[in-house]
C-alpha cells in the first residue's frame, strides 16, 4: 500500500508572512474588558486571537479547609480550566494533567506580584476559564488574571503580563496560534512584572540555538510591554472613564 | 494609577496602598493619587473591607453558638459578638437564650472592638444607635467609596439625608440602611448608587445636588 | 448553590412578604414576570453550536460538540446525546472547584430530560450505520454567574445552542463512514421551554433570583413543548407541595412558556 506523505503547510512564506497574514513580530488582535462578572470580587475577559478566556478573583476570603491557613500571609490558589467545547475534540470536563500544571504555573506567575503579607489568614482565589482555545491561552489567562486582581482591589506590587514566542520554520516569531504551536518547532511563554522588570513565568518547549533562545526571549518581553499598555487602557476605561477627580472629599 | 505605577520620587511621608522602593513611591492599587498635608495619598477605587478597631459597621447575623453571634460584616472575616457584651457580665447559656435578642438574619449596627492578626474581629453594640436595625432599605456600596459617601465633615451624607428626609446609617464596611418615606428612600438609594458608581468624578457633589433638586438642608 | 449559605436579612424577608401580598416582588416584578432574557448564539466558533444566555444577572454559556461513536446496544439506530453542566467556581462565592456537586448534577439531568423527552433532537437522524456508528452530541454548559434560576437559563442555552448547531456530513460507503467537507444542521425541531417557580410564603414566583431562592421553601421546574404538553418536571427542596399548587404551576408554565418560546425562536432562527 502506497502511503502518501501529507502536504506540510508552509507556516511562514518567503516574504515573512504567516498563515494568518501576520509578520513575524505581530500580535493577534486583543480585546480586554474589566469587571464583567457580577458576583466575583474582580474579573476580566480577554479575547486574544481566537482565544476567549474569563478570569475571576474571589478574595481575600476565609480559608477552607481551616488547616491550610497561613498565619502571616494569604494563601493564593488558582485554577486553569478548559471548557469541554473550547477545543477541536470535545474535552472531558475533569482536570487533565496539563490543566493542573498550568494552574500551578499561573499561580506562581501571579503570586510574586501580590502583597500577600497584607492579608494574613486569608485565601485569594484566581479562576481562569477557557471558553475557546487557540494557542497562548495560559499567557492570555495570566494577563486577564492580573486585571481581575487589580479589579478586586488586592494590593499588587506590579501588574503581570504574558506573551508566547517561538520558532516556526527556523524563524523566531511572536504570539503563536494553535496551528503554529502544533506544527512549529518551539514555544516559549514568558510573563513579566513590567515595572519591576522581573520574569515570573518561563516555560520552554522545543529546540533553540543559544542565539534564537535570546531572540525569542527578548521578543516575548518586548511584546509583554505592548500588552501591558492594553491592560492599562482596560483599567483606565473602567475606573477613570471621563472627568477624573484630582481631589477627594474625604475627611 | 494602576498597580506598579510610580506616584512620585523624592522624600515624602506616605499612606496606605503605597510602597516605597528606593526613592520612588509605587501605587499598589487602582486609585487616584494626591499630595496632601500628610504626604502622598492613594485613594483606592476598589478593594475589600478590612476590619479596623473602632470602625462602625452594619452586619447580618449568620450563625449563633452558645456564647455569641457570628456576624457577616462584608469582609474576609466574620465578626463575633459575645453574648456577655449584650446580656451583661452575668450571662450564662443556661439562663439566657441568645435568639431572644438577635436571630439569624437580623441586621445589626455594631462597633469593632478589636481585630488583630491572630483572631476574628470582636464586635460590640455599646453606644447609641447600635444594635438591631428593625427596618429599612439595605444598599451595599464598595467599601472604598464610603469616605466619598460621607463627604468632608459629613457634607455629602447630610445633603442626601436632609434633602430626602431619611435617616441613613452608613457602615464603614459599605453597608447602608435607609429609613423614611417610600419616595424619600427611593431618591436616597439612587443618590447613594450615584456616589458608588461615579466616585472618581470631579463634579460628583454637584451632580448629586442637581439630582436631589436644589440646595441641601443645613445638617 | 447559594441557598445553603446565603442568609436573607430578616428585614428583607419581611419586606418580601409584604410586597408579595400585593402581587409584587422586591425588584418590582409581578409574580409571573421573568427577568430580561438575552440569547446570543454562535459565540464559540470552534464548537459545533453555542449560546450565551443572560437571565437577569444569571449568565451561562452552552457549547455543542458533535463526535462519532458507537450506539447503545438496546438502541442501535439512535444517536447519543449527553448534557453536562458545571457551576464554575468563578460564578459565585458559594461555588467550589472540584467534581460536580449534587446540585450541578441535578441541574444537568433535569435540563437533559427536558430536551430528551420533548424529542427535540431526532435521534434516529443521528444514526450513520446502525449498531456501528452514530453521531454523539455533547452539550456542555458552563455557569458563569449565579443569580438564581440556573435551571431555566441552562435550558434556554442548551436549546438555543442545539438549534443553531451544525455537524460534519458523513458519507456511508461499504459499511464505513467517510468525512466530507460539508456541514449539516443538527436535526432539531420543537422548542422545549423550562419555567421554574419558587414558593415564598404562599406565593409562587416565576424565575427566582438568588435572594428569592434563599428565601424560598420549595422550587418547581416544569418544561413544556410547542403543543403545550409537559415533558419534564422536577420539584426541589426538602418541603411539600399541594396537588393544587402543582396544577397551578403547570398552568403557569404553559402560559409563560409560550411567551419565552417566541424569544428563543427569534434568537435561534
Image (cartoon, rainbow, N blue to C red):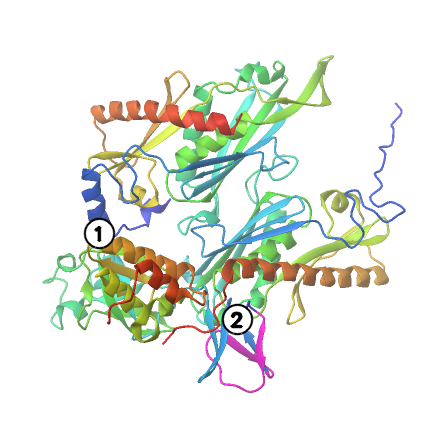
Q: Is residue C129 magenta?
A: no
Q: Quick check: can you spot residue B174?
A: no
User: Mark 2 — residue?
Assistant: B28
In the image, taking residue C85 as reference, residue B169 lies left or right, namely left
Q: Residue at x 32, y 47 (%)?
A: C4
Magenta span of residues:
B4-23
| Residue B186: % across, % down | 27, 53
Q: Do the residues at discs 1 and 2 belong to one chain? A: yes
In the image, B200 versus C58, the foreground residue is: B200
Q: Residue at x 23, y 44 (%)?
A: C16
In the image, B141 versus B127, the foreground residue is: B141
Q: Quick check: can you spot residue B135?
A: yes
| Residue C155: % across, % down | 44, 31
Q: State the predominant SS element of the stretch in magenta.
A: loop
Q: Residue at x 55, y 68 (%)?
A: B3
Crowd rating for badge 1 (residues with CA inside 10 Å; few <14, some 14–19, many 20+): few
Amino acid at each position: 500500500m502506497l502511503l502518501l506523505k501529507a502536504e506540510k503547510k508552509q507556516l511562514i512564506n518567503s516574504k515573512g508572512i504567516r498563515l494568518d497574514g501576520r509578520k513575524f513580530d505581530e500580535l493577534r488582535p486583543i480585546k480586554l474588558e474589566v469587571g464583567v462578572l457580577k458576583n466575583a470580587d474582580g474579573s476580566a475577559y480577554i479575547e486574544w486571537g481566537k482565544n476567549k478566556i474569563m478570569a475571576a478573583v474571589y478574595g481575600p476570603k476565609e480559608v477552607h479547609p481551616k488547616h491550610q491557613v497561613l498565619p502571616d500571609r494569604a494563601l493564593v490558589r488558582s485554577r486553569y480550566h478548559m471548557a469541554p467545547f473550547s477545543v477541536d475534540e470535545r474535552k472531558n470536563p475533569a482536570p487533565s494533567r496539563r490543566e493542573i500544571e498550568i494552574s500551578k504555573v499561573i499561580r506562581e506567575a501571579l503570586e510574586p506580584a501580590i502583597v500577600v503579607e497584607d492579608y494574613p489568614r486569608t485565601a485569594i482565589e484566581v479562576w481562569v476559564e477557557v471558553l475557546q482555545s487557540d494557542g497562548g491561552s495560559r499567557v492570555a489567562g495570566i494577563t486577564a488574571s492580573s486585571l481581575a486582581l487589580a479589579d478586586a482591589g488586592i494590593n499588587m506590587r506590579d501588574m503581570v503580563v504574558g506573551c508566547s514566542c517561538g520558532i516556526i520554520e527556523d524563524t523566531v516569531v511572536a504570539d503563536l496560534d494553535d496551528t503554529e504551536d502544533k506544527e512549529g518547532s518551539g514555544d516559549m511563554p514568558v510573563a513579566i512584572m513590567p515595572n519591576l522588570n522581573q520574569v515570573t513565568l518561563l516555560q520552554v518547549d522545543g529546540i533553540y540555538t543559544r542565539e534564537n533562545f535570546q531572540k525569542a526571549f527578548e521578543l516575548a518581553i518586548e511584546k509583554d510591554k505592548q500588552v501591558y499598555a492594553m491592560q492599562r487602557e482596560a483599567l483606565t476605561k473602567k475606573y477613570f472613564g471621563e472627568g477624573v477627580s484630582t481631589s477627594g472629599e474625604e475627611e | 494609577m494602576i498597580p506598579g505605577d510610580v506616584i512620585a520620587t523624592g522624600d515624602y511621608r506616605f499612606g496606605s496602598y503605597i510602597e516605597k522602593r528606593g526613592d520612588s513611591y509605587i501605587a499598589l492599587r487602582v486609585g487616584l493619587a494626591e499630595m496632601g498635608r500628610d504626604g502622598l495619598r492613594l485613594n483606592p477605587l476598589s478593594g475589600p473591607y478590612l476590619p479596623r478597631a473602632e470602625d462602625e459597621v452594619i452586619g447580618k447575623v449568620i450563625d449563633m453558638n452558645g456564647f455569641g453571634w457570628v456576624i457577616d460584616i462584608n469582609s474576609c472575616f466574620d465578626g463575633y459578638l459575645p453574648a456577655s457584651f449584650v446580656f451583661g457580665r452575668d450571662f450564662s447559656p443556661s439562663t439566657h437564650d441568645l435568639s431572644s435578642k438577635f436571630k439569624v438574619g437580623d441586621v445589626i449596627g455594631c462597633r469593632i472592638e478589636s481585630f488583630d492578626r491572630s483572631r476574628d474581629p470582636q464586635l460590640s453594640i455599646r453606644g447609641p444607635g447600635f444594635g438591631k436595625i428593625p427596618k429599612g432599605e439595605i444598599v451595599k456600596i464598595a467599601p472604598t467609596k464610603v469616605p466619598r459617601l460621607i463627604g468632608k465633615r459629613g457634607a455629602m451624607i447630610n445633603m442626601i439625608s436632609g434633602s430626602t428626609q431619611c435617616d441613613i446609617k452608613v457602615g464603614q464596611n459599605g453597608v447602608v440602611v435607609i429609613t423614611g418615606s417610600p419616595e424619600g428612600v427611593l431618591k436616597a438609594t439612587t443618590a447613594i448608587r450615584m456616589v458608588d458608581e461615579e466616585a472618581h468624578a470631579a463634579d460628583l457633589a454637584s451632580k448629586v445636588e442637581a439630582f436631589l433638586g436644589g440646595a441641601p438642608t443645613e445638617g | 448553590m447559594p441557598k445553603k449559605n446565603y442568609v436573607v436579612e430578616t428585614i428583607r424577608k419581611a419586606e418580601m412578604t409584604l410586597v408579595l401580598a400585593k402581587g409584587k416582588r422586591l425588584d418590582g416584578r409581578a409574580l409571573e414576570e421573568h427577568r430580561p432574557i438575552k440569547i446570543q448564539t454562535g459565540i464559540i466558533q470552534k464548537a459545533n453550536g453555542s449560546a450565551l444566555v443572560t437571565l437577569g444577572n444569571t449568565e451561562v454559556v452552552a457549547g455543542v460538540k458533535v463526535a462519532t461513536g458507537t450506539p447503545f446496544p438496546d438502541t442501535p439506530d439512535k444517536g447519543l446525546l449527553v448534557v453536562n453542566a458545571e457551576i464554575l467556581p468563578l460564578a459565585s462565592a458559594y461555588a467550589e472547584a472540584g467534581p460536580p456537586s449534587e446540585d450541578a448534577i441535578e441541574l444537568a439531568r433535569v435540563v437533559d430530560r427536558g430536551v430528551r423527552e420533548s424529542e427535540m433532537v431526532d435521534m434516529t437522524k443521528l444514526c450513520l450505520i446502525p449498531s456501528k456508528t452514530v453521531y454523539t452530541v455533547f452539550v456542555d454548559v458552563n455557569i458563569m454567574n449565579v443569580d438564581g434560576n440556573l435551571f431555566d437559563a441552562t435550558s434556554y442555552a442548551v436549546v438555543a445552542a442545539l438549534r443553531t448547531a451544525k455537524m460534519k456530513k458523513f458519507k456511508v460507503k461499504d459499511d464505513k463512514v467517510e468525512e466530507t467537507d460539508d456541514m449539516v444542521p443538527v436535526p432539531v425541531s420543537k422548542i422545549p421551554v423550562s419555567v421554574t417557580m419558587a414558593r415564598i410564603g404562599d406565593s409562587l414566583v416565576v424565575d427566582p433570583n438568588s435572594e428569592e431562592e434563599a428565601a424560598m421553601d420549595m422550587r418547581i421546574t416544569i418544561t413544556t413543548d410547542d403543543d403545550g404538553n409537559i415533558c419534564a418536571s422536577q420539584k426541589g427542596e426538602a418541603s411539600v407541595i399541594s396537588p393544587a399548587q402543582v396544577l397551578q404551576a403547570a398552568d403557569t408554565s404553559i402560559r409563560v412558556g409560550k411567551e419565552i418560546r417566541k424569544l428563543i425562536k427569534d434568537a435561534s432562527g
